Amino acid sequence: MIPASFEYVRATSLSEVIGLLQKDPDNTKLVAGGHTLIPTLKLRLASPALLIDIGGIGELKGIEIGDRIRIGALTKHAELLASKELHDMLPIFHQAADIIADPQVRNRGTIGGSLANADPAADWPAVIIALKAELEIAGPSGSRRIGATDFFVDIFTTALEIDEVLVAIHIPRPDAGTQFRYRKIRHPASGYAVVGVAVGASMKDGVVSNVTIGITGAAGHAFAADAATDYLIGKSLGRETIERAARLASEQAPCLSDHYASAEYRQHLIRTEVARALASLVGAT
Ligand SMILES: Cc1cc2nc3c(=O)[nH]c(=O)nc-3n(C[C@H](O)[C@H](O)[C@H](O)COP(=O)(O)OP(=O)(O)OC[C@H]3O[C@@H](n4cnc5c(N)ncnc54)[C@H](O)[C@@H]3O)c2cc1C
């Protein structure tokens, strides 16, 4: 379990990283928290010639809360868990970070590393989809932004090009009174999501005025449960409405099957977790 040899550079700026990446992007890897990449190197599933450590780059750090919310890609799960300001505005960060892995992983793993890695069972993809976030990406031709739903393309595949860096996550400020829920069925060994459901919703005069649902763990990549959310707008959250929305969410994407959970079981878990999250918005759990 010893990696193939590689050159190591600890970069000090984003422009340095982009310059280094351009030289030989196919044989270069970025390392943030290293909690996925280092085991991958040790198993020789990847053998880059150059490893660029981005951990010291200030432009990729920090949580800023203003008209919009900006979370640097290097922000660790533990920082997202600890931020009181973020908790007051978007409690879903606390809800999700609290059930990611264990303290050791939370103290090293970064939100940017998790999103760039696009493990279909990672928690943050569902959360940023439910928050209608945009991802800021930097590359040789400058900076661009992409919506969260378009960022996730397939299992371990995103819209990032090999010479690009994920810089930050931008989130619109939620309307006053928006409620958030994150629920997951954890894999008992790793803590990863067998199914994870993130919901953001506002109610006006007893009916749903705005709602987003992000789902992870179930399919090849996280997705927005659009059919369910379109159906929910303008409805009160009674039992039948909740059940119909949960069913629509479970039917939106083909589910994965593996030795731990069949596709049918994952589909069932989407139904139960979406239903529980929606019911809890009206105190019906
Ligand atoms: C035992 C264990 C349990 C875990 N449980 C969970 C869990 O319950 N839920 C969960 O969501 N996650 C879980 N994880 C994953 C963990 O939380 C990290 O998010 C994950 O390892 C990736 O983050 P990292 O910072 O360590 O990235 P790294 O390992 O450093 O990098 C991962 C990949 O992303 C690329 N990358 C990193 N940063 C950037 C960037 N800014 N721009 C472009 N590319 C980049 C790297 O090149 C690499 O390919 C677990 C991990 C372990 C080891």
Image (cartoon, rainbow, N blue to C red):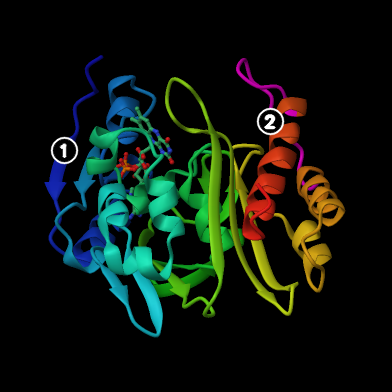
Quadrant housing residue 149: bottom right
**What secondary structure is the magenta-colored segment mainly?**
loop
Q: Position of residue 2 (x, y in %)?
A: 22, 17
Is 167 above or below relative to 176?
A: above
Q: What's the amino acid at mark 1? A: Glu
Q: Looking at the image, in which quadrant does ligand 1 appear?
A: top left
The x, y position of residue 95, in whole percent, is: 43, 50
Q: Is residue 264 above or below residue 115?
A: above
Q: Residue shown at 55%/65% (left/top)?
A: 179
Q: Which residues are magenta?
A: 252-263
The verdict on label 2 being within 8 Å of ligand 1 is no
What amino acid type is highlighted by mark number 2? Leu
Is label 2 in a helix, a strand or a loop?
loop
* Residue 276 shows in this picture: yes
Residue on which disc 1 sits:
7
Front one among 207 and 222: 207
205 horizontally vs 138: left or right: right
Q: Position of residue 104 (x, y in %)?
A: 23, 34
Q: Is residue 237 magenta?
A: no
Tag 2 residue: 256
- Residue at the image position 44 percent from the left and 30 percent from the top: 191
Near-viewer residue (225 or 150): 225
The earlier-in-sequence mark between 1 and 2 is 1
Q: How many marks?
A: 2
Q: Are marks 1 and 2 in contact (CB under 8 Å)?
A: no
Residue 139 visible within the image: no
Residue 141 position, x and y percent, is: 40, 73
Dividing the picture into quarters, in which one does residue 34 lie?
top left
